């Protein structure tokens, strides 16, 4: 004999369960998942990080993660954008007391190099999974690089207006400074194994200032 379970009028168990699942997923902020992903990457590297492990670390269901990110690479892309863009935004305060826009750009660029080079996530990627960083050097610009270039463009345009930066094609100037910045950020640690870091950063500031001086 079959026993039918009755639900309140207008509701079915499956619909209610689905709604609860969606609500639970919606309540979990992306930052919670990205924080968990960061913890996993720092502990074991990208290649050994799984969506299941991210879910366990975040204390959510695997489906909650799967609904936001289809694979680990997509989580990493979002994590890198959040972390490195945040570092660069924080570095922008280094130029708050600059005398002019060129000086401000130089100070921000140097602070950005230092912040990226010292960041635990950035260092882990370079040390453990450098092949994941390589495409952003030899194939395409990532979201963080695009963000940094936009900031550089705005500063260069402001420097043109106040006369502190020599006039040239803005896009080419911004791209050139971006390439110098990322070169120093990627190589600062190995380049300072036998050289004082502050001395090298002083030269970095001189290079950028000289390149932009009218």
Image (cartoon, rainbow, N blue to C red):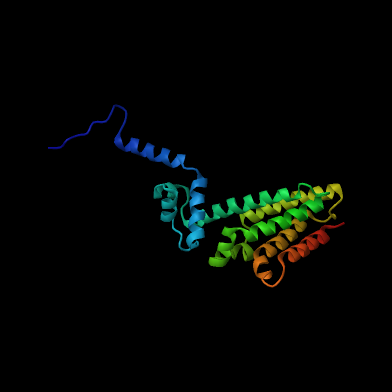
Q: Give the vertical position of 141 relative to 11 (above or below).
A: below
Q: Give the vertical position of 118 relative to 98 (above or below).
A: below
Relative side of 122 to 113, left or right: left
Give the quadrant of the C terminus: bottom right
Front in this rendered view, residue 48 or 150: 48
Residue furthest toward the top?
9
Q: Residue 171, how many percent across, how many down? A: 75, 55
Residue furthest toward the left?
1
Residue at the image position 65 percent from the left and 66 percent from the top = 189
Q: Residue 26, how many percent across, how many down? A: 46, 40
Give the quadrant of the N terminus: top left
Q: Is residue 74 visible?
A: no
Q: Quadrant of residue 167?
A: bottom right
What count of labels does the image hold? 0
Q: Residue 148, how many percent across, how many down? A: 68, 53
Residue at the image position 84 percent from the left and 54 percent from the top = 165
Q: Residue 38, how many percent across, how many down? A: 52, 54
Relative side of 85 to 77, left or right: right
Residue at the image position 30 percent from the left and 33 percent from the top = 12
Relative side of 169 to 10, left or right: right
Front in this rendered view, residue 155 or 191: 191
Q: Is residue 188 visible?
A: yes
Residue at the image position 83 percent from the left and 50 percent from the top = 160
Q: Quadrant of residue 3?
A: top left
């Amino acid at each position: 004999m079959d026993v039918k379970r009755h639900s309140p009028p207008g509701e079915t168990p499956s619909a209610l369960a689905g709604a609860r699942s969606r609500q639970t997923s919606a309540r979990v902020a992306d930052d919670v998942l990205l924080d968990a992903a960061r913890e996993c990457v720092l502990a074991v590297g990208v290649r050994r990080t799984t969506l299941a492990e991210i879910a366990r670390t975040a204390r959510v269901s695997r489906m909650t993660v799967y609904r936001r990110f289809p694979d680990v690479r997509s989580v990493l892309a979002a994590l890198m954008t959040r972390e490195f863009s945040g570092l660069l935004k924080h570095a922008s305060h280094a130029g708050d007391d600059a005398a002019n826009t060129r000086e401000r750009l130089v100070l921000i660029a140097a602070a950005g190099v230092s912040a990226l080079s010292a960041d635990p996530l950035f260092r882990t990627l370079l040390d453990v999974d450098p092949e994941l960083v390589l495409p952003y050097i030899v194939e395409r610009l990532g979201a963080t690089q695009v963000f940094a270039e936009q900031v550089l463009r705005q500063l260069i345009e402001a420097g043109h207006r106040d006369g502190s930066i020599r006039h040239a094609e803005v896009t080419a100037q911004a791209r050139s400074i971006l390439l110098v910045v990322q070169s120093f950020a990627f190589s600062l640690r190995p380049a300072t194994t036998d050289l004082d870091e502050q001395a090298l950063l002083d030269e970095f500031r001189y290079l950028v200032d000289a390149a932009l001086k009218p």
